[in-house]
């Protein structure tokens, strides 16, 4: 009897990258001190005590234990609509908002809504690996739009338009970017949106790291004031980073009436509704935690400045781009697979970072270092260890990736 086979679209998708990288940490013997985890973009602190108390109260309530509205609790949709109306300096109605179980669910729902199997979505490279994984498992072609260090990892509008054909349905942008940290200027976002409108495509704009933009930068873009946003724009956001609640899984989506109706079908089938306790606590937190969020953003900006200043003095390592949460660096071993370099970095120096190869084609010269969850003394320790490696601190020539081959 032949056993059934899983969906081949799913089996063709590699194992989750964070899980793969976590496997490398077991090979480190602690010789330089505790492992420094620069692998995942997670806050290294708890939310404020009053917010935590509100989360706890909601978690113990009968109301939050029940199903909620598919598109999110009315109070949170209204509060978030008011918040983003201020950010983008244009009215955004609560009916345009969907609350989701994290931004990854918002993206998954958006992709099902805008494209079907056999159609194409354009992703700038390097791309966020969960975006690539989602498209692969849905049978949607991921069409790579290359970006380059010499241009600040910004997509070129002419190169984007050259990729469009009859099967193209959307362009996905992430700004501030994951993995590079690049911030897309408003005029570039507008130019790319105009192409999407003219060619009948959606622009799906992931602004997970929006809260970490410089405070005097102004509105990230003006697209929500454009009437064509109703038909051509989907905005994504995550509460995880700025509110320090990644485990509570809460994100948001902004879209026009037609797309929100389709999103509702997807969310109902995936999870029925987003987690209720954080939905109950966040309407208070959006305004009450504004100063707290700004202070955390300023602390992360200071870490970025320290990282940029210090890595310039580490032989062989080149900072290509740095931004809200990430540094995208060129490692000192040209021609070697980035996964091998990252695994050796974990094994020999106790620094866990992600290889550029996790983020798409032609990225093997790079590593992504998530510095935002590392305090300033930890950043100094990273640089000490990198310099130690540059001066012969790593001597083992075996390939550490072989040790975790079972992880994909």
Image: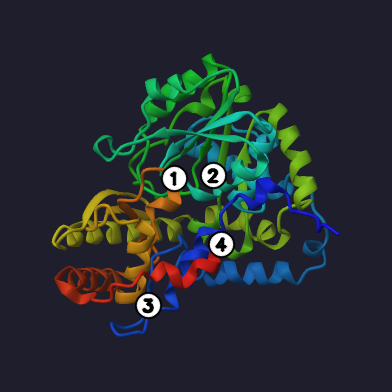
Q: Secondary structure at mark 2?
A: helix
Distance in Å between CA atoms under marks 3 and 2: 29 Å
Residue 175 image position (x, y, % from top left)? 43, 41
Residues at discs 1 and 2 in contact (Cβ within 8 Å): yes
Q: Secondary structure at mark 4?
A: helix
Q: Which residue is mark 2?
A: 132
> Which label sits on residue 360?
1
Q: Which quadrant would residue 257 be assigned to in this image?
A: top right
Residues at discs 4 and 3 in contact (Cβ within 8 Å): no
Q: Which of labels 3 and 1 is toward the front?
A: 1
Task: Give the crowd class for mark 4: few <14, some 14-19, many >=20 residues within 10 Å.
Answer: some
How many marks the image carries: the answer is 4
Q: Secondary structure at mark 1?
A: loop
Distance in Å between CA atoms under marks 2 and 4: 21 Å
Which quadrant: the C terminus?
bottom right
- Tell me which label, 3 or 1, sits earlier in the chain: 3
Residue 117 image position (x, y, % from top left)? 68, 33
Q: Residue furthest top?
A: 198
- Tell me which label, 4 or 1, sits earlier in the chain: 4
Distance in Å between CA atoms under marks 1 and 2: 8 Å
- Tell me which label, 3 or 2, sits earlier in the chain: 3
Residue 336 appears left or right of 90: left
Q: Which quadrant would residue 199 be assigned to in this image?
A: top right
Residues at discs 2 and 4 in contact (Cβ within 8 Å): no
Residue 283 appears left or right of 192: right
Name the residue located 42 percent from the left edge and 64 percent from the top edge. Answer: 39
Q: Which residue is mark 3?
A: 35
Which quadrant: the N terminus?
bottom right
Question: Which of the two residues, 166 or 216, is positioned nearer the viewer here?
Answer: 166
Task: Give the crowd class for mark 2: few <14, some 14-19, many >=20 residues within 10 Å.
Answer: many
Q: Which residue is mark 4?
A: 246
Distance in Å between CA atoms under marks 4 and 3: 21 Å
């Amino acid at each position: 009897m032949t056993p059934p086979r899983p969906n081949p679209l799913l089996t063709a998708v590699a194992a989750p990258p964070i899980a793969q990288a976590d496997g490398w940490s077991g090979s480190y013997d602690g010789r330089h001190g505790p492992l420094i985890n620069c692998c995942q973009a997670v806050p290294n602190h708890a939310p404020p005590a009053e917010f935590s108390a509100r989360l706890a109260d909601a978690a113990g309530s009968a109301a939050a234990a029940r199903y909620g509205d598919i598109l999110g609790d009315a109070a949170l949709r209204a509060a978030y609509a008011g918040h983003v109306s201020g950010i983008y300096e244009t009215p955004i109605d609560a009916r345009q908002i969907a609350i989701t179980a994290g931004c990854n669910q918002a993206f998954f729902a958006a992709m099902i809504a805008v494209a079907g199997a056999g159609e194409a979505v354009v992703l700038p490279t390097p791309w966020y690996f969960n975006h690539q994984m989602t498209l692969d498992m849905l049978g949607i072609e991921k069409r790579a739009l290359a970006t380059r260090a010499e241009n600040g990892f910004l997509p070129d509008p002419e190169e984007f338009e050259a990729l469009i054909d009859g099967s193209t349905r959307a362009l996905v942008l992430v700004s501030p970017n994951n993995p590079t940290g690049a911030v897309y200027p408003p005029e570039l976002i507008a130019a790319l949106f105009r192409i999407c409108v003219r060619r009948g495509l959606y622009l799906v704009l992931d602004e997970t790291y929006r809260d970490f933009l410089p405070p005097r930068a102004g509105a990230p873009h003006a697209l929500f004031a454009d009437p064509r946003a109703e038909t051509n724009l989907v905005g994504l956001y995550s509460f995880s980073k700025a509110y320090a609640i990644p485990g509570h899984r809460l994100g948001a989506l902004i879209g026009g009436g037609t797309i929100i109706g389709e999103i509702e079908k997807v969310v109902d089938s995936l999870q029925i509704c987003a987690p209720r306790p954080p939905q109950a606590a966040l309407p208070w937190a959006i305004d009450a935690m504004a100063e707290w969020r700004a202070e955390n953003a300023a602390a992360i900006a200071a870490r970025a400045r320290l990282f940029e200043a210090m890595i310039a003095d580490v032989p062989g390592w080149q900072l290509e781009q740095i931004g809200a949460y990430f540094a995208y660096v060129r490692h000192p071993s040209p021609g070697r697979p980035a996964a091998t370099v990252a695994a050796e970095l974990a094994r020999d120096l106790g620094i866990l970072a992600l290889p550029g190869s996790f983020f798409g084609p032609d990225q093997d010269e790079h590593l992504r270092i998530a510095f935002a969850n590392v305090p300033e003394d930890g950043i100094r320790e990273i640089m000490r260890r990198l310099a130690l490696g540059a001066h012969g601190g790593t001597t083992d020539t075996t390939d550490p990736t072989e040790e975790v081959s079972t992880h994909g």
